Image (tube, rainbow, N blue to C red):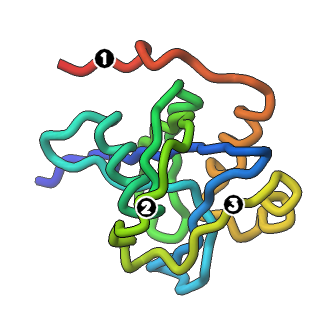
Amino acid sequence: MDQWAPHVTVACVIERDGKYLMVEERDKFSGKLVFNQPAGHLEDGESITEAALRETLEETGWHVELTGVLCVALHRAPTNNNTYFRTTFLATPLQRDEGARIDPDIHAIHWLDYEEILANSARMRSPIALAVIERHRRGTFYPLDLIHST
């Protein structure tokens, strides 16, 4: 008998000079190009903070510093009926690694302002992508020590 378990994912909201670092990727289920924050799945043996840093580097080539927790969310994706448990971090960009190998699923990397994100809101991978930007704009976040790993 299979036991149900959500997919554990992480993401980072990274803002610089009024623009947000977003990735454009092909949705595996619909085939459409969608926007999302740098995000991905937790791997065995890593902490969620390590996963957030790794996924951001793999998807954008940016090294970032995590500065807070924006949101913990549960989302059932209508495209595949999977449930995702996502922790979204707030991060500051530090340095772009020009030699980084970007995940082949990433079509493009963009720095978008809020108006550009709103204009593309129908192309967000999930409703969480826009919701966490809204939280950031309201100044809603929690300290990193909210996260505890053993």
Residue at point 32% right, 50% down? 54
Task: Compare marks 2 and 3 and give the one earlier in the sequence.
Answer: 2
Crowdedness of circle 1 by 10 Å Cα count: few (<14), some, many (20+)? few
Three-letter amino acid code at the position of disc 1: His
Residue 148 shows which numbered tag? 1
Residue depth check, mark 1 versus mark 3: number of the one nearer the observer: 3
In the picture of the structure, the residue carrying the numbered disc 3 is 111
Give the quadrant of residue 90.
top right
Expressed as whole percent of the image width and height from the top left, the position of residue 25 reads: 53, 74
SS assignment at label 2 = loop
Q: Decide which of 119, 95 is in the foreground and name it.
A: 95
Residue 12, percent across and down? 52, 44
Residue at 39% x, 71% y: name it: 102
Give the spatial CA distance, label 1 vs label 3: 31 Å
Q: Which residue is mark 2?
A: 61
Q: Given the image, on which type of amino acid does mark 3 rest?
A: Trp
Considering the image in quadrants, where does the C terminus appear? top left
Tell how many labels: 3
Question: How many C-alpha atoms fall within 10 Å of the one at disc 3: few (<14), some, or many (≥20)?
Answer: some
Q: Is residue 80 above or below residue 82?
A: below
